[in-house]
Image: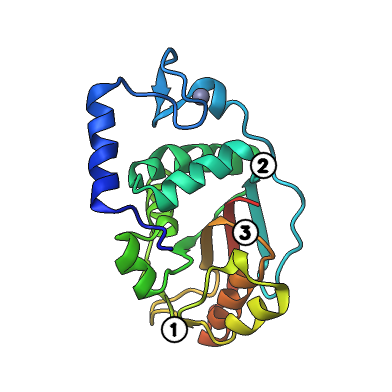
Amino acid sequence: MSDSPTLLQRLGHELANLLWPAQCLVCGSGNESLHGSVCERCWGKLLPAPAVVLPKPIDRLAVAYAYDDTLRTLIHQFKFNQTPGLAAPLAQRFSDRLDGMGFVFFDSILVPVPAHPARLRERGYNPAELLTKELAALLELPFDPRIASRLHHNPHQSSLPDEARKRSLKDSFHVTPPPEDYSETTRLVLVDDVVHSGRTIGQLARAARKAGWKQIDAVCLCA
Ligand SMILES: [Zn+2]
């Protein structure tokens, strides 16, 4: 079954927005003032991320939040229900939390974990890219989604057993070498919305290292 909404579903969604006033995407409350389609109470429920093992060869990894019910609902809306507008409020919380964790970006270029072209066509946007773009704007850092691309179409990662997931990730990414004016102190910061085993982002980091990037960090919205 396809994850992307049909035209009828999209029309239904728009019609619902016209007929009923906006409700919080998480709790459904219509009485609270909303910030980016979510009420302050739900935003306030976000929890710190559990410890995540650092995938090699990433130098520093910062994960902002736990992938709990609130974020699961929001990420699902963001990825599958055609709500790209969630990128800005999510990036704001992401940035606030990284700042609170004391994560310093230094001289960095932000690069989203790329989506495969087929997935991009199906969805119309790469959620990680939208999130990265908003995050880069908040941090006033450069953002370049052309640096990394995905080579093979992977089945949905979360539905695969570990070994199959490992196999499907083999040689999945292409990363362009650093530009000629590259300073070795420039950090490539890989950005993703959800990190599960860390294998995907680790694979991307290995491709980046092979391409010649020396300093590689990763920041993820949740785990
Ligand atoms: Zn709410």
Which residue corresponds to the image point at 70% horizontal and 69% vertical from the top-left? 55
Can you give x and y, in whole percent of width and height, for residue 114 in the image? 44, 69
Can residue 141 be spotted in the picture? no
- The span from disc 3 to disc 1 (Cα, nearest Å) is 20 Å
Q: Nearer the viewer, mark 3 or mark 2?
A: 3
The label shown at residue 101 is 2
Q: Quadrant of residue 203?
A: bottom right
Disc 1 is placed on an element classified as loop
At horizontal 45% and vertical 61% (from top left) the residue drawn is 110
- Between marks 1 and 2 in the image, the one whose residue lies nearer the viewer: 1
Name the kind of residue labelled 1 in the image. Answer: Leu
Residue for badge 3: 195
Residue 170 sits in which quadrant? bottom right
Residue lying at 64% horizontally and 51% vertically, measured from the top left = 63
Q: Gap between marks 1 and 2, in whole Å?
A: 34 Å
Residue contact between numbered discs 1 and 2, judged by CB atoms under 8 Å: no
Q: Position of residue 132 (x, y in %)?
A: 43, 55
Mark closest to the chain's N terminus, 1 or 2:
2
Classify mark 2: helix, strand or loop.
Answer: loop
**Kind of residue at badge 2:** Met
Which residue position holds label 1?
A: 151
